[in-house]
Image (cartoon, rainbow, N blue to C red):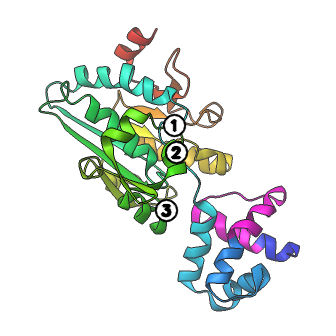
């Protein structure tokens, strides 16, 4: 791939998804776009880029963008964020929302659904404490293909072995041949929607808890700041944001600050004092 072609595809991906591809990541273009070229009966990446340049085919652009922005996920990824959610954030919300008995959660860039389904299983396990509550989990992703997989809730043996406790596998999944399907009751707890993090999320409504983990690492500083600013606008004063272990708001956004003693969990800089007292 020549320099001009690389710059063209890198700019296309940046404009459509915010994804930053540098020269040292050029190998990703090879591994992820060659299958797209084959699906379109094109002879390799050079032909693919030629088709993008000449035809400006929206469907082809979508396929290319989705191939480059689809990332792996797994159940109970890193464990600690979900322990924090169950032991710290959820009790806070149960107290703070006791009058209206409603909690809204956003799983942004949800990929194939493991994160929102993990949250749904945690909440299902807490059903006794949540009796009479309305809990909404909205999960979004840029890729319509990956959202369809998430909605189907069908996972390979390898996927269910990555982080999912055997007790929850047996409780909430049924085996179909060599694969496992998550139960209908868990699937009904999650609403999936197509959404680009470069857009304004206000149409999704406000959220008490936002999971936006392992997403910002793919953006440049300016885009990270813009995404965080938009997220802050749809959260209440005591809302909480989850970022990935390699992500931070430091030097990027003044809207959030880390919850003391809780790595990876952030609150709006003007709220969350009651949780601060509990966490401190």
Depth check, mark 3 against mark 1: the one in front is 1
Write down the quadrant of residue 273 in the picture. Answer: top left
Q: CA distance from mark 2 to mark 3?
A: 18 Å
Numbered tag placed on residue 163 in the rendering: 1
Q: CA distance from mark 1 to mark 2?
A: 7 Å
Q: CA distance from mark 3 to mark 1?
A: 25 Å
Per the image, the residue denoted by label 2 is 74
Q: Residue most toward the right?
A: 2
Q: Residues within 10 Å of mark 2 (few under 14, many from 20)?
A: some
Residue contact at pointers 1 and 2, CB within 8 angstroms: yes
Residue range corresponding to the magenta coloring: 8-32
| Relative image position of residue 109 (x, y in whole percent) | 49, 52
Q: Secondary structure at mark 3?
A: loop
| Relative image position of residue 204 (x, y in whole percent) | 33, 53
* Horizontal side of residue 163 vs 128, given as left or right: right
Please tell me which residue lies in front, 276 or 60: 60
Mark before the other along the chain sequence, 2 or 3: 2
* Horizontal side of residue 154 vs 58, given as left or right: left
The answer, for residue 25, to whether it is visible in the render is yes
| Relative image position of residue 42 (x, y in whole percent) | 70, 88
Depth check, mark 1 against mark 2: the one in front is 1
Q: Residue at x 69, y 91 (%)?
A: 54
Residue 59 sits above or below residue 235 on the image: below
Q: Secondary structure at mark 1?
A: loop
Residue 175 sits above or below residue 245 on the image: below
Q: Residue most toward the front?
A: 177
Residue 196 sits above or below residue 251 on the image: below
Depth check, mark 2 against mark 3: the one in front is 2
Q: Is residue 223 magenta?
A: no
Per the image, the residue denoted by label 3 is 142
Mark before the other along the chain sequence, 1 or 2: 2
């Amino acid at each position: 791939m020549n320099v001009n072609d690389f710059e063209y595809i890198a700019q296309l991906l940046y404009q459509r998804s915010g994804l930053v591809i540098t020269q040292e990541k050029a190998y990703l273009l090879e591994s992820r776009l060659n299958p797209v070229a084959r699906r379109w009966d094109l002879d390799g990446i050079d032909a693919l880029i030629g088709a993008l340049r000449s035809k400006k085919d929206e469907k082809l652009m979508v396929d290319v963008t989705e191939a480059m922005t689809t990332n792996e996920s797994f159940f109970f990824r890193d464990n600690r964020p979900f322990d924090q959610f169950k032991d710290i954030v959820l009790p806070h919300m149960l107290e703070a929302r006791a009058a209206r008995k409603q909690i809204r959660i956003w799983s942004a860039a949800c990929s194939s659904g493991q994160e929102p389904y993990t949250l749904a299983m945690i909440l299902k396990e807490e059903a006794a404490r949540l009796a009479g509550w309305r809990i909404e989990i909205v999960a979004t992703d840029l890729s319509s293909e990956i959202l369809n997989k998430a909605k189907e809730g069908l996972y390979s043996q390898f996927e269910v072995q990555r982080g999912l406790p055997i007790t929850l596998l047996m409780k909430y999944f049924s085996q179909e041949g060599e694969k496992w399907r998550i139960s209908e009751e868990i699937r009904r707890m999650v609403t999936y929607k197509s959404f680009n993090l470069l857009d304004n999320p206000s149409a999704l409504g406000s959220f008490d808890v936002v999971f936006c983990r392992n997403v910002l690492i793919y953006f440049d500083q300016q885009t990270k700041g813009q995404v965080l600013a938009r997220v802050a606008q749809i959260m209440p004063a005591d809302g909480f944001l989850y970022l990935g272990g390699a992500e931070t708001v430091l030097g990027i956004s003044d809207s959030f600050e880390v919850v003391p003693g809780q790595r990876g969990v952030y609150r709006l800089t003007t709220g969350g004092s009651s949780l601060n007292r509990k966490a401190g």
